[in-house]
Amino acid sequence: MEIERHEYDVVVIGAGGAGLRAAIEARQQGKRTAIICKSLFGKAHTVMAEGGAAAAMGNVNSDDNWMVHFRDTMRGGKFLNNWRMAELHAKEAPDRVWELEAWGALFDRTKDGKISQRNFGGHEYPRLAHVGDRTGLELIRTLQQRVVALQQEDEKLHGDPEAYIKVFAECTITRLLKDASSVHGKNGAISGAFGYWRETGKFVVFDAPAVVLATGGIGKSYVVTSNSWEYTGDGHALALLAGAQLINMEFIQFHPTGMVWPPSVRGILVTESVRGDGGVLRNSENRRFMFDYVPDVFKDKYATTEEEADRWYTDQANNRRPPELLPRDEVARAINAEVKAGRGSPQGGVFLDVSTRLPAAEIVKRLPSMHHQFKELADVDITKEPMQVGPTCHYIMGGVEVDADTGAASVPGLFAAGEVSGGMHGSNRLGGNSLSDLLVFGRRAGAGAAEYVNGLARRPAVSEAAVEDARAEALAPLERSGGENPYEVHHELQRTMNDLVGIIRKAEEISEALDAVEKLKERAQHTASPGGRIYNPGWHLALDLRNMLLVSECVARAALLREESRGGHTRDDYPKMSPEWRRKLLVCSATPDGDTVDVEERIQPSMRADLLALFDRTELSKYLTEGELTEYDAVKES
């Protein structure tokens, strides 16, 4: 069976914000670069990031700076973040946003012509550079245009627009390939990737010494999710099967505001910009309930009365923030509690109201996508009535363990950026940090991959035996007769994760989920996809099941081990945060066949002294152990 072959220096898997920025950087470093996207080019899930890109430019409030942004990010992640990643992100985000502007991004403007910045949950100052509520779409458009500009340069220089950067759309990668020769160490090195064209089913091999994973998240393992169909944990699973490690997999962000009605659109994202621009959450008693849910660690920073909360929008220096702008994990848990207490909306959510807070024309101006979305999908005019919203699986904080400065994983030649990488956001991501994360670490991963290729004495070779194994694995569902329907297995996995490893967790339910996942893994091995290879969605899902099951097992195993509640991981049987657990990273690894997943504890590296000094002792005492506080005191005294 003939297999299509391509040779590149760097292969980027994923064409969202992180993937495009990585590919642009690799190309600008002179590397022949392939961009592989699972769906159509331009349909990346990045377009669903509506609110803005967080960057401490200080355009609206000059008190903002990278140190404040760093502190907010660490607080949001409950101090489990990779502090080096949080530092780099806070320092470099402004340059990445200005770079986008130089490439043609059309941001909203302040009265004096600067890039406008809006309020968002967990951010002390207005920090999100935005384009109405369509910022992700503008980011993707701008990066795509940059790719086209580079291709135009290459056409002038080389007579071929795709000489140094080419897009391969509707292509799914199923295995990373490695050179196992001893010269590359005991675990080998990346030598390429194997995949198939979704339209024809034909196989393709990309020969490349460096691969950047930028595949996004895992949301399709859950019933209610804001994620699009591509989010099946492909990059997480590819990394695991290649020998890399995943960290923080127990932490899943349930965005507090997804649509809940009608059922056909349940889970679609409702941007945090609604609350950032003055929208409030109310229960069935018409009460702003978030004042009841401000945790102790945040009580000094959030308003205790509606009057103070409302004043904050016009006088932030003398008032505390509205509790609707707490970090997402806190708001999601509060909504969940209100619904369980019988104070929810008719369709099982709560009410998000901006209609009584802003003039109709201002709502349409600031939130055009939300106005259109609710009018078209739910027949609700948000300028006249409240929306019904509830939590939706939105983002996973866990991902491939990488070097903060280069994006390199533990496997030589493998890099990761964006949602598929772990560490940056700790136990909970602040809204707006995702888009700037994509830009900062997409660029660093692309540069890291280029530098790695420059340092190679020789290119790792693709193993033909590994190609044949990957081909046989991909064909297996088509060659079985009488096997189980992959859609049934997928639906049961979604129900299992949604019901047993969701917002609120307990040991017996997580254990039940692990038992179910083991049985589903066995059933997935016997799924069959009738028909041929030409655009066969059942076959595609049968192959994606391996990834979703592997990632779901990592989530559940880590969630069972972490006996505390922190960020996107809430244990009903361990409801408090533990300073001892804050020091522990849970690291997932798997056997090459994916049959066995192991989770081990590792001590979280201590924060650098100058960064630790940015926090006061009172705040740190809520998170750090006594031993760490003693170290802090010593730093302060010196």
Image (cartoon, rainbow, N blue to C red):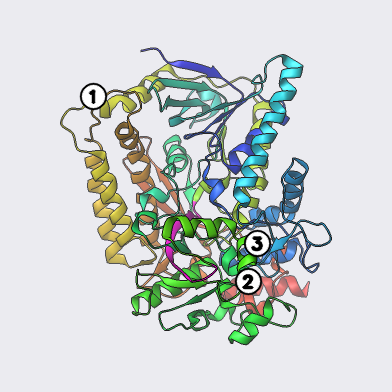
Q: Residue drawn at (50%, 34%), measured in percent from left and top?
A: 40
Quadrant, the C terminus:
bottom right
314 to the left or right of 603? right
- Magenta residues: mostly which secondary structure? strand
Q: Is residue 79 left or right of residue 194?
A: right
Disc with the residue nearer the chain's start (3 vs 1): 1
Label ID, residue 359: 2
Q: Which quadrant of the structure image shows residue 467?
A: top left
Residue that numbered label 3 is attached to: 607
Q: Position of residue 547 (x, y in %)?
A: 38, 41
N-terminal of the pair, mark 2 or mark 3, is 2
Residue depicted at 48% across the width and 40% down the height: 244
Q: Quadrant of the N terminus?
A: top left
Nearer the N terminus, badge 1 or badge 2?
A: 2
The answer to whether residue 600 shows anywhere in this view is yes
Q: Amino acid at mark 1?
A: Glu
- Is residue 624 in view? no
Circle 2/circle 3 CB separation < 8 Å: no
Q: Callout 1: helix, strand or loop?
A: helix
Instruction: Tell which of 313 and 326 is nearer to you.
Output: 313
Residue under the image location 57 percent in, 46 percent down: 418
Q: Is residue 250 above or below residue 27?
A: below
Q: Amino acid at mark 3?
A: Met
Tell me the residue at 30%/36% (across/down).
542
Q: Is residue 519 left or right of residue 226?
A: left
Q: CA distance from mark 2 to mark 3?
A: 46 Å
Q: Secondary structure at mark 2?
A: loop
* Magenta segment boundaries in residue numbering: 383-398
